[in-house]
Amino acid sequence: MYCKYVYKASATQANILADVVAVLTGTSSVASLSSDCDKVNSVLITTVAAGWTVHDPSAGTNSQVLKAAFADDTATFKYLWISTNTSGYIITAIYETWNASTHTGTNLCYYSNNTTVSQRIVTSGSNILNVLATARYALFLSDTGAGYTNKGPSSGYCVSGVVERTREMSWDTPAAGYPPYLYFCWGGLSPAYAPRVKARGTGDLTGSSATMNLGPVYHSSLSNIETGFIPDAGGNQYALASSINVNRAGLSYNYASLFGNITSSCDIWVLPLSTYNTYDQVSMDGKTYLALPFNANDTGKILIRMA
């Protein structure tokens, strides 16, 4: 699912939350969104289902928790806490579990509830929040048209949200119960953080200790990725996006994958630096992808499917 959600000036926190929850949980038309949605300029593409359901509609003032099942364990879920209650932001915190009766979660992905890595909401005028999702991920990018520091997270201009990874380690099985996902904010948060991973010893790592690196396969320099090719509109050839690995923090990100791969699970790719512009649409294998930024200076792009 891809939604270019355009909210009106003076839109309320409650209506923005309700609209974002609606597009993530299967609304098929912008006509069904609130009166604070600019329905003429908003776009909703549901070629691929969003794949999330409401788990706790009362998770705090102007806050709800959604869930989506794992690819390899449909009885276990990722939990996404969405809140518009902090003025100027939409916060998308990630938890391992969430109790809908007590309205509390366990094992927060470190820092994912901080405004520094949250998308901006600016209601002094009409602005844009991009929302992209399948059952494997939910990603967000605000665009206020006011420069880099106001477009994406406070620390830069980049997509943020939750992404699922594949499982590569022998201990990392559905039966073992480790959550195969992490908070994604490549340009605004380094390294990435998972809810919980296995330690090198006998325990588990959570919070700021559950750290992981993200990176393209094969090469440490994004400008030299060469794993395939796609032409641009002028017929030139640019190196195709590489898949995104998840590795133990402290290792160079071009190491072979240790903790899994985001691309295989989410169909999200990383592009070589300075090859495409934000909002460029890229055709690959009969699918259409949107190029969106992942670093603060807007030179790095990832491809996320839109249709």
Image (cartoon, rainbow, N blue to C red):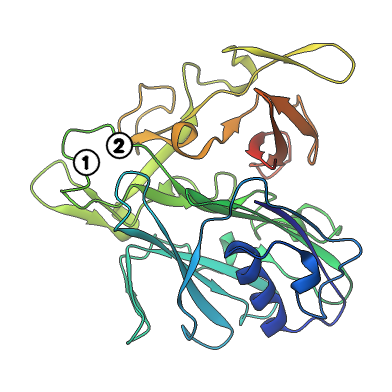
Circle 2 is placed at which residue position?
Answer: 167
Question: How far is disc 2 from disc 1 in space, using C-alphas?
Answer: 6 Å
* Amino acid of disc 1: Asp
Please give left or right for residue 173 compared with residue 283 in the image.
Answer: left
Q: Quadrant of the rendered structure where residue 245 is?
A: top left
**How far across and how far down the image is residue 213, in percent?**
41, 38
* Amino acid of disc 2: Arg
Compared to residue 65, the image places residue 300 above or below, namely: above
Asked which secondary structure carries label 2, the reply is loop
Compared to residue 89, the image places residue 291 above or below, namely: above
**How far across and how far down the image is residue 190, in percent?**
48, 46
Q: How many marks?
A: 2
Which mark sits nearer the N-terminus, 2 or 1? Answer: 2
- Contact (Cβ within 8 Å) of mark 2 with mark 1: yes
Q: Residue at x 43, y 22 (%)?
A: 254
Compared to residue 176, the image places residue 106 above or below, namely: below
Q: Nearer the viewer, residue 57 or 280?
A: 57
Q: Nearer the viewer, residue 178 or 184?
A: 178
Counting other residues with Cα less than 10 Å from the Cα at mark 1, is it few (<14), some (14-19), or many (20 or more)?
some
Give the label on residue 172, or none. 1
Q: Nearer the viewer, residue 34 or 94?
A: 34
**How far across and how far down the image is residue 16, in percent?**
71, 76
Q: Nearer the viewer, residue 157 or 28?
A: 28
